[in-house]
């Protein structure tokens, strides 16, 4: 703890100082309790929706954690991953193979949004709801509680091609580290966040064929691969429905068993296995296998960091009314109108008035 705070004091103080020097408009930072006055129940309502859905199907928790990751890595944490229609035409992120059909939890976000809209209309962004729901899912599955800085605004674009920036299960250590570095996350953050794979499931196409090569190379347990071969049909494609739990030992609990399984050749994806094959990454994985508290502390910090990727704040983007579609009038023509009449758009929220 001491080491952590002294290590962070410099950069945090510097960031705070730099922030004071910046002009306020459009460059607002996320803040814990952003909805304190504009929608004091927002976080409780999201938690209720997540808790209810989790009681019915515990798979929504891993689904919602991954949803936040897949949102943040593509166009920043702006709920672009939720859009079913791209106003500019073409498929959306949600349609793309890295998300379709595996991504889940959309209906939980819709239920949370409906509750929040009833309580405080046009105030809480879908992107913040996704971030709160991921935090609640982490908490419900046995990991820590952390405060989520909020004030994200929702984007108006979703482009299927851009989803291929998401790291895939065939990624090498170098691919993984590079992909996270491009989003401002360190190699250690990458290893820490991969620990999310302590819960949830994976489709056969994400591991089966690649693991046959690992079997030949001796980097997967033969008994484990035999089990996976029995779960999956012999050939797979994007829509093959069969899945495996990712953490063979405790698939619904956010513990550090994921890291303990890796040296036993029981990592499910090639990308998981890479964390112990690479000399730069392996010490992180073994530290988290040895100390669960350490991993949980770092996990909370890394989730907050991930939640800050390329966020839209202030007057950027919009507060979407329906998380699946951009607001009416926020098409290209609508954006031109807003630039011509910036003060009078339906996009201005009580929240902006309250916090500015
Ligand atoms: C390091 C690079 C990563 C790679 C290559 C990767 C890859 C994958 C793959 C292939 C799946 C299975 C998808 C399927 O076929 O159903 C998966 C699932 C999952 N991933 Fe990752 N992932 C990475 C990082 C992350 C991060 C940063 C998070 C969250 C912070 C995360 C959270 C999850 C969760 C919770 C699941 C289970 C989803 C469910 O049960 O619905 N992953 N990941
Ligand atoms: C909201 O309230 C909490 C608890 O009192 C406080 O920690 C936080 O700083 C407040 N945030 C804002 C933006 O007012
Ligand atoms: C409960 O979960 C199942 C999937 O396990 C889903 O089909 C169903 O819609 C859920 N029901 C509610 C009320 O959320
Ligand atoms: C979940 O969050 C609550 C606070 O809201 C906290 O008391 C509890 O300890 C957290 N659960 C875990 C497993 O950390
Ligand atoms: C989607 O993004 C790709 C790659 O950045 C770009 O080539 C393509 O034109 C975009 N499509 C649309 C409809 O904007
Ligand atoms: C290990 O990963 C690092 C990136 O974290 C990369 O620079 C290095 O080349 C990798 N080492 C090997 C042997 O692949
Ligand atoms: C992964 O790295 C290899 C070799 O460095 C490179 O050829 C490949 O394009 C990378 N793949 C991705 C998805 O970045
Ligand atoms: C992973 O690589 C294998 C070949 O080794 C290929 O068949 C499979 O489609 C790839 N999977 C993904 C998700 O890229
Ligand atoms: C895979 O899923 C299909 C469809 O649900 C099912 O019929 C089949 O038994 C499952 N298992 C295997 C090994 O194919
Ligand atoms: C585990 O990590 C925690 C948090 O950093 C630390 O306080 C504790 O001393 C570590 N335990 C051991 C046995 O190293
Ligand atoms: C949100 O938009 C989708 C797609 O148009 C629609 O199916 C759904 O009913 C809408 N939800 C609400 C609550 O209006």
Image (cartoon, helix red, strand yellow):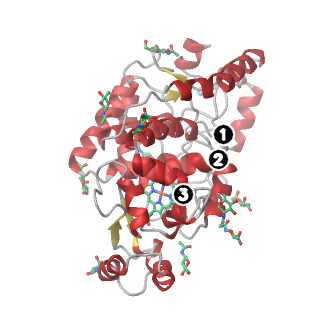
Tell me the quadrant of ligand 4. top left
| Mark 2 neighbour class, 10 Å CA radius: few under 14, some 14 to 19, many 20 or more | many
Residue 123 in the figure: left or right of residue 55: right
Query: At 58% across and 18% down in the image, what residue appears?
Result: 352
Residue 90 appears in the figure: no
* Nearer to us in this view, 355 or 23: 23
Q: Report the residue marked by disc 3.
A: 282
Query: At 68% across and 50% down in the image, what residue appears?
Result: 181
Callout 1 secondary element: loop
Which quadrant holds residue 117? Answer: top left
Q: Report the residue marked by disc 1.
A: 310
> Is the residue indicated by label 2 positioned so its CB lies within 8 Å of ligand 5?
no
Query: At 47% across and 20% down in the image, what residue appears?
Result: 35
Q: Determine whether 151 is above or below 113 in the image.
A: above
| Mark 3 neighbour class, 10 Å CA radius: few under 14, some 14 to 19, many 20 or more | some
Foreground: disc 1 or disc 3: 3
Callout 2 secondary element: loop
- Gap between marks 3 and 2 measured at Cα: 30 Å
- Gap between marks 1 and 2 measured at Cα: 7 Å
Q: Determine whether 28 is above or below 206 in the image.
A: above
């Amino acid at each position: 703890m001491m080491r952590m705070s002294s290590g962070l004091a410099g950069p945090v103080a510097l960031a705070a100082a730099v922030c004071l020097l910046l002009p306020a408009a459009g460059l607002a930072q996320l803040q814990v309790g952003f909805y304190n006055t504009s929608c004091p129940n927002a976080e409780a309502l999201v938690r209720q929706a997540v808790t209810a859905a989790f009681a019915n199907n515990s798979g929504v928790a891993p689904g919602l954690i991954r949803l936040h990751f897949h949102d943040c890595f593509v166009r920043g944490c702006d709920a672009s991953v939720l859009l079913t229609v791209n106003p500019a035409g073409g498929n959306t992120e949600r349609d793309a193979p890295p998300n379709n059909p595996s991504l889940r939890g959309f209906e939980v976000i819709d239920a949370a949004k409906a509750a929040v809209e009833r309580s405080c209309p046009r105030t809480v962004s879908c992107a913040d709801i996704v971030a709160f729901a991921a935090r609640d899912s982490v908490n419900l599955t046995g990991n820590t509680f952390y405060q989520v800085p909020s004030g994200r605004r929702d984007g108006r674009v979703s482009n299927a091609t851009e989803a291929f920036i998401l790291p895939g299960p065939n990624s090498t250590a170098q691919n993984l580290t590079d992909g996270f570095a491009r989003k401002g996350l360190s190699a250690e953050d990458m290893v820490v966040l991969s620990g999310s794979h302590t819960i949830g499931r994976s489709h056969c196409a994400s591991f089966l064929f690649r693991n046959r090569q690992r079997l030949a190379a001796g980097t997967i347990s033969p008994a484990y691969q035999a089990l996976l071969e029995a779960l999956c049909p012999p050939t797979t494609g994007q829509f093959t429905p069969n899945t495996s739990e990712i953490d063979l030992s405790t698939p619904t609990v956010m513990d550090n068993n994921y890291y303990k399984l890796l040296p036993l050749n029981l990592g499910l994806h090639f990308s998981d296995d890479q964390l112990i094959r690479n000399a730069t990454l392996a010490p992180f994985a073994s530290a988290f296998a040895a100390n669960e508290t350490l991993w949980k502390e770092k996990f909370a910090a890394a989730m907050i960091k991930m939640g800050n990727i390329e966020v839209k704040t202030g007057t950027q983007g919009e507060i979407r009314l329906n998380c699946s579609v951009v607001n009416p009038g926020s098409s290209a023509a609508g954006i031109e109108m807003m630039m011509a009449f910036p003060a009078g758009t339906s996009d201005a929220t009580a929240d902006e008035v309250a916090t500015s």
